[in-house]
Image (spheres, rainbow, N blue to C red):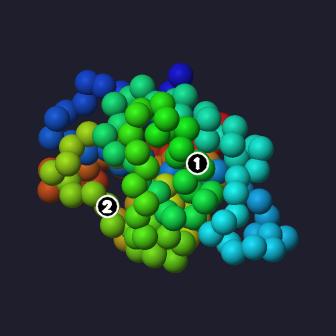
Amino acid sequence: MLTQQAQRFRFPMIETMQTILLIRHAKAENRETWAAVDELRPLTPVGREQALTIAKKWGGQGIKSIASSPALRCVQTVQPLATATGIDVAIDPNLREGAKIALPDPKHTGIHALCGHGDNIPALLDDLAIIWDDCQKGSIWILERDGKGQVTESSYVPPA
């Protein structure tokens, strides 16, 4: 079941609109104690549960594309969603930690999921002049955009 905030984004949606799900990767192993390359840092058991919850909530909503940072924790966050939707995860370097997120062309209507990090999602929200006060691991920012790429609505869905 979708949260109350997300229910208003259920189908049927206006065909000229685009919905972006900005997913912050789920809970990952501790950065400070992880000895290998940071991009290989995986999800914890809690993070894997968060990823499954995202897939359960959004898997049947008609998602058209799924893109992820190359970081393993991001890919693992959206892999259950990809399995639920039958859509391959596209690796996008613009979603990498420290990178500037590029949103899909607004002509591509429908729901598009992007999985990024705790630095670039808030930076994008700032760029879009969206007032935010939270971006927890496993959370989703929902952006509704018109055909010109203007954000018409935004809401935050905290992690489960």
Indicate whether 126 appears above or below 53.
Answer: below
Residue 26 horizontal side relative to residue 17, left or right: right
Question: Residue 34 at what x, y percent from top left?
Answer: 80, 70
Question: Considering only order in the chain, which callout, 2 or 1, is on the residue closer to the N terminus?
Answer: 1
Q: What residue is drawn where x is 35% and y is 37%?
A: 63
Which residue reaches farthest right? 33
Which residue in the structure is indicated by mark 1?
A: 77
What amino acid is at disc 2?
Leu
Indicate whether 44 appears above or below 55.
Answer: below
Q: What residue is drawn where x is 70% and y is 57%?
A: 42
Q: Quadrant of the C terminus?
A: top right
Q: What residue is drawn where x is 51% and y is 64%?
A: 70
Indicate whether 30 appears above or below 142.
Answer: below
Figure quadrant of residue 150 = bottom left
Q: Are marks 1 and 2 in contact (CB under 8 Å)?
A: no
Which residue in the structure is indicated by mark 2?
A: 103
Question: Residue 105 at what x, y percent from top left?
Answer: 21, 58
What amino acid is at disc 1?
Thr
Mark 1–mark 2 distance (CA, rounded to whole Å): 19 Å
Which residue is more in the foreground, 55 or 151? 55
* Pointer 2 local density, CA inside 10 Å: few below 14, some 14–19, many at least 20: some
Question: Residue 142 at what x, y percent from top left?
Answer: 42, 46
